[in-house]
Image (cartoon, grey):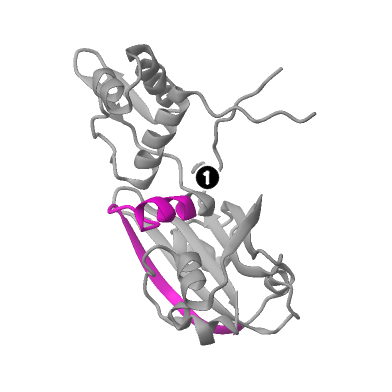
């Protein structure tokens, strides 16, 4: 019989929370991380658990300890995935941190490229809504080129998807409220390839730069695609990192 999955150990949950703050810039490079004593009190855990949480962050290269001083954030080399941004929006009402700036080089109707049409289950060349965003960190510059596509019919019931501005809480909660189409699950996949010319320009990359490509398709309860996302990440920026229990 299948067994119920174990939740992550408490120290990894604490480390994951702090990692999220570091990756998004809420804790910028050079900022001091809460001490073991402060973490133990805030999370109501024993001091050794807090110690292990900070050790996990050190192993990931996100923080460094300075003898007699404390633990401080290093220059991050990570970026949040679309999945993590959606989770953040559900918890905090926004996908982005105060240290992130979002630009919209294009929002409008376009003919669907073949891979977009296939992901959305529509005919190639059909009209779709495209929302393209460049996400910049005030500390490290461009960290992500993100493009979302939606079936054109959604623009009638959820017109803000055609407005070149941030939708507080994220597009999926807005679509659920405005169009009554709630996301039930998502599927993602990742690959690496050479950056296209427009991607290099958006991310300030030199010629022949590799990038990490992250696709996410969101479905409603009838297994109908609602949104297709493509996020492009620059080299040396980890965008797919997670901890999970292993039982042997």
Q: Above or below — where is 240 with respect to 166? A: above
Q: Secondary structure at mark 1?
A: loop
Number of dots carrying numbers: 1
Q: Residues within 10 Å of mark 1 (few under 14, many from 20)?
A: many
Residue 112: % across, % down: 66, 79
Residue drawn at 29 percent across, 19 percent down: 36
Residue 140: % across, % down: 34, 48
Q: Above or below — where is 119 with respect to 71? A: below
Q: Quadrant of residue 136?
A: bottom left
Query: Is 95 within the magenta?
Result: yes
Residue drawn at 54 percent across, 58 percent down: 231
Q: Above or below — where is 157 with respect to 13? A: below
Residue drawn at 71 percent across, 17 percent down: 248
The N terminus sits in image quarter: top right
Query: Is 208 within the magenta?
Result: no
> Circle 1 is placed at which residue position?
239
Q: Quadrant of residue 149?
A: bottom right
In this rendering, position of residue 66 left or right of residue 182: left
In this rendering, position of residue 171 left or right of residue 66: right
Residue 162: % across, % down: 46, 82
Looking at the image, which is closer to me, 227 or 67? Answer: 227
Q: Above or below — where is 222 with respect to 72? A: below
Q: Find the residue positioned furthest to the left.
A: 69
In this rendering, position of residue 246 left or right of residue 92: right
Residue drawn at 41 percent across, 29 percent down: 15
Write the start and end of the magenta stretch as one range.
85-110
Q: Find the residue positioned furthest to the front.
A: 1
């Amino acid at each position: 019989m299948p067994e119920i999955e174990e939740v992550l150990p408490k120290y990894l949950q604490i480390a994951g929370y702090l990692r999220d703050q570091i990756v998004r810039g809420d804790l910028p490079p050079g900022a001091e991380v809460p001490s073991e004593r402060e973490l133990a009190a805030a999370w109501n855990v024993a001091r050794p658990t807090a110690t292990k949480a900070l050790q996990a962050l050190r192993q990931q290269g996100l923080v460094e300890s300075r003898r007699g001083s404390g633990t401080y954030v290093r220059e991050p080399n990570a970026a949040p995935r679309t999945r993590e941004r959606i989770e953040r929006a559900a918890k905090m009402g926004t996908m982005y941190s105060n240290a992130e700036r979002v630009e919209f080089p294009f929002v409008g109707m376009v003919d669907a490229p073949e891979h977009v049409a296939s992901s959305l289950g529509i005919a190639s060349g059909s009209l779709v809504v495209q929302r393209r965003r460049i996400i910049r960190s005030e500390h490290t510059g461009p960290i992500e080129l993100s493009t979302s596509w939606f079936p054109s019919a959604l623009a009638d019931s959820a017109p803000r998807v055609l407005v070149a501005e941030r939708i507080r809480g994220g597009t999926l909660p807005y679509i659920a409220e405005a169009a009554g189409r709630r996301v039930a699950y998502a599927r993602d996949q990742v690959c690496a390839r050479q950056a296209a010319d427009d991607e290099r320009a958006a991310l300030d990359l030199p010629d022949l730069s590799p990038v990490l490509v992250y696709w996410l398709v969101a479905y409603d309860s009838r297994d109908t695609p609602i949104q297709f996302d493509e996020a492009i990440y620059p080299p040396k920026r980890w965008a797919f990192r997670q901890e999970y229990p292993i039982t042997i």
